[in-house]
Amino acid sequence: MYLRVIPRAFLTSALLLAGCGNNNEATGESVAAKAPPPQPEPYVVDLRAVGMRFAGPSEIPAGWTTFRFSNASGMTHFAIIDVPPEGIDAREMNDTVMAPFQDAMDGMNAGDEEAVNAAFARFPAWIADLTRAGGPGMVSAGLTGETTVYLAPGHYVIECYVKADGVFHSTSPGQGELGMVMDLTVTNDENGAPEPTPTATLAVRNTGFEWIGGGPVAGTNTVRVNFEEQQALPSFVGNDVHVIRVSDPDTINQTSDWMDWRTPDGLQDPAPAQFLGGINDLPAGAHGYFTVDLEPGDYALIAEMPDPLASGFVLPFSIK
């Protein structure tokens, strides 16, 4: 009697054949495909304009954040995201920034240059350090706009300064009350949301707008906005993008005049055009996104600044 040594190569082949004998053809059983890993979802924040107030969460995680801005009021609104210095909240901004702005506006309406200068002199020294982190562009009553920006951990203040009867929406309606000003804290937690995939890309420079990748089409558009340059204008604003529907030949001229808050009728509700959203100021080198549904018709991109038409910040386009 002896032990027969089986070559290793033969054993390997036999094991492989044995495994093949247990496949789904032999057993009649199907092998379930391995489920793909779940895809990351957008992180959506529902923000509403209700009358002269914002309604939304006071705390969110960091990352790419899509603000679904629903205008449930009867007026035009936007939601610019301010980045104040550390320790400055909505209450402090109300007392030291919003109140002087309203006093300056009152002086402008009255033609009182001395009162205007006195109001501006009350601004705190830290206002030079105030920056912006985008936010939803102007949306007309009853409509909803979507804007996506990256928010790092920190404290932010959301505001709207469209006017009603000469009064900024951000102005306090009474002692101890806030107008359209809201605190937002972004925590160190990550929301895990992906960066949006654009259907078109827009460049914003100090000379105006330019489509640099694709362009608007009928249906849903997700526009990446590259803020290649940014500027500080005499009206305390910078480059931004808002979408309007052009209903007649006078729409663009009237809206261009309306975009300067320093005039009595500037940013005064009702607006001369229907606003569909957009994106507010971001620093030079940053980018964000806005999503807008477009049906056939005439439209334009326009900036909130003094005389955007003469400055190159009106870009008409049509959807066929």
Image: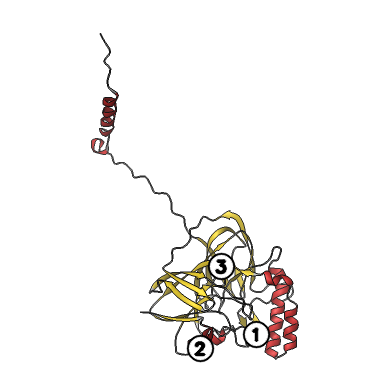
The kind of residue tagged 3 is Leu
Q: Residue at label 3?
A: 47
Provide the secondary structure element on which disc 1 rests: loop
Q: Residue furthest top?
A: 1
Q: Quadrant of residue 318?
A: bottom left
Q: Is residue 91 left or right of residue 252?
A: right
Provide the secondary structure element on which disc 2 rests: helix
The kind of residue tagged 1 is Gly
Of circles 2 and 1, which is in front?
A: 2
Q: Position of residue 72 (x, y in %)?
A: 54, 74
Q: Is residue 88 left or right of residue 35?
A: right
Provide the secondary structure element on which disc 3 rests: strand
Question: What is the CA distance from the residue labelled 2 to the residue labelled 1?
Answer: 21 Å
Question: What is the CA distance from the residue labelled 3 to the residue labelled 1?
Answer: 25 Å
Q: Residue at label 1?
A: 166
> Is 203 in front, or is 80?
203
Mark 1: give few (<14), some (14-19) or many (20+) Cα within 10 Å: some
Question: What is the CA distance from the residue labelled 3 to the residue labelled 2?
Answer: 31 Å
Q: Is residue 54 left or right of residue 32?
A: right
Q: Residue at label 2?
A: 253
